[in-house]
Amino acid sequence: MDNTESIIHLKSASKGFYSKEARIDILENTDFSVKKGETVAIVGASGIGKSTLLNILGTLDKPDNGSLMFKDKDLFLLKDSELAKFRNKNIGFVFQFHHLLIGFTALENVAIPCMISSSINGKNLFKRDMEKQTNIEKQALKILERVGLKHRTSSRVADLSGGEQQRVALARALVNKPDLLLADEPTGNLDKKNSRGVHQLISELNKEMGMTIVIVTHNEELADLMDKKVTITSGKITTI
């Protein structure tokens, strides 16, 4: 793939872990690029390093060596505070376990990334957070409506079904309109009906928002919806 077409490019990256007996290499001097607007499924057996790769792409983990280019910027040269700001603005995360704040409503959970963004930019959040008709609330309401949860905005997480909780998690990941959505087994805890609903929603949102998506999944139906599938073999990322 031509690197000039890539929104994100992992270059010459290696990553390994040490067990009691030896080092286990996950990535070995490998490259991986994703084009803007492309959808990619990372598939394969458990334990090959799919989530490790996703965490590196999301800057939640770092390779032992190599670079991660986002457009023309090497992300691993950024300071931690700069990297946190970058993640908040440019990357949305969805995990198998939704990691929502249980005591908060759907609307409050989705608004949190916007509030963090405002805080990072030095704005006074207190007054804004107390007003019902703020830009943050409107933004959160809009994405909740898009994922089909307009009627559940005031519901607390504990009162939502599993499928609704994952839709809230998806809305939270998308509320800042990130360039890149990273999802790790996003339907792993859902039944078939709810899984298909989330699959369809992810596919639709990719087309509507022009968003780049990388998903780790064992679900063949979800993987088949992506533009391409890759796996990790002998430390290299290969297209299936």
Image: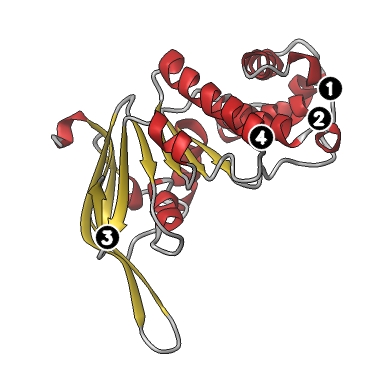
**Sequence-first tag of 2 and 4:** 2
User: Which amino acid, by three-letter code, is at mark 2?
Assistant: Thr
Q: Is residue 37 above or below residue 23?
A: above
Mark 2 packing: few (<14 Cα in 10 Å), some, or many (20+)?
Answer: many
Which-is-in-front pick, marks 2 and 3?
3
Which-is-in-front pick, marks 4 and 3?
3
Mark 1 and mark 4: Cα distance apart in space: 16 Å
| Residue nearer the viewer, 124 or 113 | 113
Locate residue 225, reporting x and y percent.
41, 29
Residue where numbered disc 3 is placed? 233
Residue where numbered disc 4 is placed? 166
Residue where numbered disc 1 is placed? 154
Which-is-in-front pick, marks 1 and 3?
3
Mark 2 and mark 3: Cα distance apart in space: 42 Å
Residue at point 84%, 38% (across, down): 158
Q: Secondary structure at mark 2?
A: loop
Mark 4 and mark 3: Cα distance apart in space: 31 Å
Q: Secondary structure at mark 1?
A: loop
Residue where numbered disc 2 is placed? 105
Q: Place residue 53 in its image quadrant.
A: bottom left
Locate residue 138, reporting x and y percent.
68, 12
Mark 3 packing: few (<14 Cα in 10 Å), some, or many (20+)?
Answer: some
Which-is-in-front pick, marks 1 and 4?
4
Find out whether the residues at labels 2 and 3 contact each other: C-beta distance under 8 Å: no
User: Which amino acid, by three-letter code, is at mark 4?
Assistant: Gln
User: Which amino acid, by three-letter code, is at mark 3?
Assistant: Thr
Q: Secondary structure at mark 4?
A: helix
Q: Secondary structure at mark 3?
A: strand
